[in-house]
Image (cartoon, grey):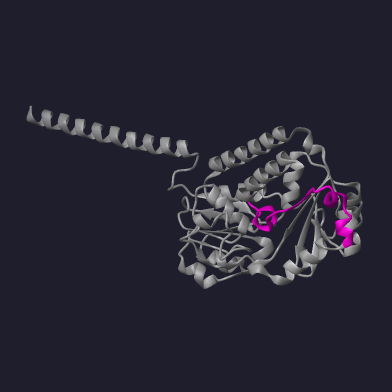
Amino acid sequence: MKSFKLIFTLISIMSLLLLAACGNTEEKADKAEDTGNKTEDTSYTVEHAMGSTTIEKTPERVVILTNEGTEALLALGVTPVGAVQSWLGDPWYDHIKDDMKDVEVVGVESEVNLEKIASLKPDLIIGNKLRLEAVYDQLSAIAPTVFSDTLRGDWKENFKLYAKALNLEEKGNEVLAEFDTHVEDVKANLGDKVDQEISVVRFMAGKSRIYYTDSFSGVIFDQLGFKRTAAQAELFAADNKLGNLAIEVGKEVIPKMDGDVLFYFTYAPQGDQAALDTAKEWTSDPLWKNLNAVKSGNVHEVSDAVWNTAGGVLAANLMLDEIEAIFEAK
């Protein structure tokens, strides 16, 4: 009888342990389902510009090597341990600096500090083929590395890749859906104001460009439904070395900068006086002053960081807010 009771007791204990184990497994599955991600102990493979990379678990220490990628991480709720310096700011853009206080600088997009990156012990590195193809193997020796292909106005494709690499695809889809809703809200609020022809100009040290439909600002204006002038369409059809991104022009082309509304920004890192002088020289030129947009008071100077250089989802949302405010004030 005692043996029977002992066996019964052991069976009861084993049943309780089995039930507890099942509960823990279900709890983990529920958590994974809630976050939209795989459980942390499940590896996953990401296809990217340099091939495929297997990541053993959801990354916790991420180094990001593009400006638009930094914005992607922050939008996904991830603070990187290291990031390339912003093209403007000291060292970060004003609109992200409060979220980057403890982040280490690891160089700039075109030249990263490999020793610094290694010292941060990352479990994921995200970069870009256009910028850093030459050091991809060295980065991969430090940690699993995922590269986007290029850097153009349509930041969404890169964003989706980064979200997948971070094992945050569902959160990424939510961020993109919120942005698209923002676009539709602004478009609805502006009504027939989006039927106007807009022009976008950038000044740099000794250079001036017209930015077009494949630029960061251009993609957003296109989503909103704004038009471009026939003169600019002809200009880009004749010279498309940079596709529909931008074209460098001389002062004789200033008349083709015209539109119903003209926006311009100046790339002047560390207050680059040469760039500021270029902007002043061009906007003081008689040809500029003769533009219909200038004479009608429809010229707006905006931030190069937000409207062009940052290139990510946070800047895109800020730009939408600024467009709405500018056109509603007219």
Is residue 72 visible in the rendered image? The answer is yes
Q: Tell me the quarter of the image containing the C terminus.
A: top right
212 left or right, relative to 99: right
Q: Quadrant of residue 190?
A: top right
Image position, residue 15 (x, y; %): 25, 31
User: Which quadrant holds residue 210?
Assistant: bottom right
State whether residue 133 appears in this view.
Answer: no
Residue 325 lies in the magenta stretch: no
Q: Residue at x 49, y 42 (%)?
A: 37
Number of labels in the image equals: 0
Q: Does 293 lie within the magenta span? A: yes
Left or right, 57 with respect to 3, comes to right
Image: magenta residue range: 286-312
Q: Residue at x 83, y 47 (%)?
A: 296
The image shows residue 187 at horizontal and vertical percentages of 72, 36
Q: Which residue is most to the left? A: 2
Q: Quadrant of the N terminus?
A: top left
